[in-house]
Amino acid sequence: MSDRIPFRIRPMLATLVEEPFHRPGWVYEEKYDGDRILAYKEGDAVRLLSRNANDHTARFLKIAAAVGALRSRTLLLDGEMVVFDRRGVSRFQLLQQGRGEASYAVFDCLYRDGRDLRREGLAVRRKTLEATIGEDERLLLARRLAENGLAAYRVAKRKGYEGVVAKDLASPYVEGR
């Protein structure tokens, strides 16, 4: 098996909606306030790239090391680089100013050990992600909120989160949309 991921991607983007909603078969995650980062692990090499393909590996060496320590030989993870305040809320200003320890809140796994997962539904990709992320406190699974979208929105507002990201469990990963 090759240690190379045979493609590079543009991240899937969220669509802004005016009102919170609930749909069966959807999940609701915290919307993080940070930098969108794609983590490419190819053998012993790790690169952390922004949505515009700028390399942030040197800026987040501890995160790169944590991704490098994961057992998979090849990985492509999608997530948000964040710094949390004392209440556990991500704050972009803290990340930008270098105040506090950065964490990588990972919400998707698009490639693992030779298997392209982009056409799989989110439910399959999330299970793969859960089986991949280890115990390192710098790597976090994106927080799932209440199963009901309206309740998730209320929780997010009450806790001061940036918002909610609603995701269809059956949806494949669609780049750039």
Image (cartoon, grey):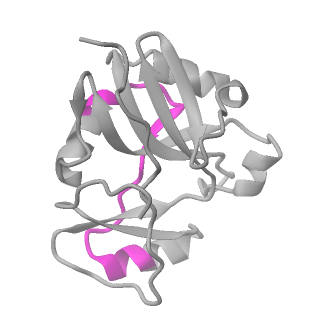
- Magenta stretch: give its range: 131-153
Q: Residue at x 55, y 18 (%)?
A: 65
**In the rendering, at what x and y percent does residue 76 appear?**
39, 33
Q: Which residue is drawn at 59% across and 53% down?
A: 88
Viewer-closest of 135 and 24: 24
**In the rendering, at what x and y percent does residue 3 appear?**
35, 14
Image quarter of residue 87: bottom right
Residue 135 on the magenta segment? yes
Q: Indicate left or right for 93 with 171 as reference.
A: right
Residue 78 on the magenta segment? no
Above or below — where is 38 with respect to 90? above
Residue at the front extreme, as displayed: 6
**In the rendering, at what x and y percent does residue 78 appear?**
44, 43
**In the rendering, at what x and y percent does residue 168 appear?**
24, 66
Q: Indicate left or right for 105 with 99 as reference.
A: left
Q: What quarter of the picture does the C terminus occupy?
A: bottom left
Viewer-closest of 103 and 107: 107
Above or below — where is 143 with respect to 126? below
Image quarter of residue 124: top left
Residue at the bottom extreme, as displayed: 19
Q: Residue at x 33, y 57 (%)?
A: 174
Q: Which residue is drawn at 66% across and 46% down?
A: 83
Q: Indicate left or right for 109 with 157 as reference.
A: left
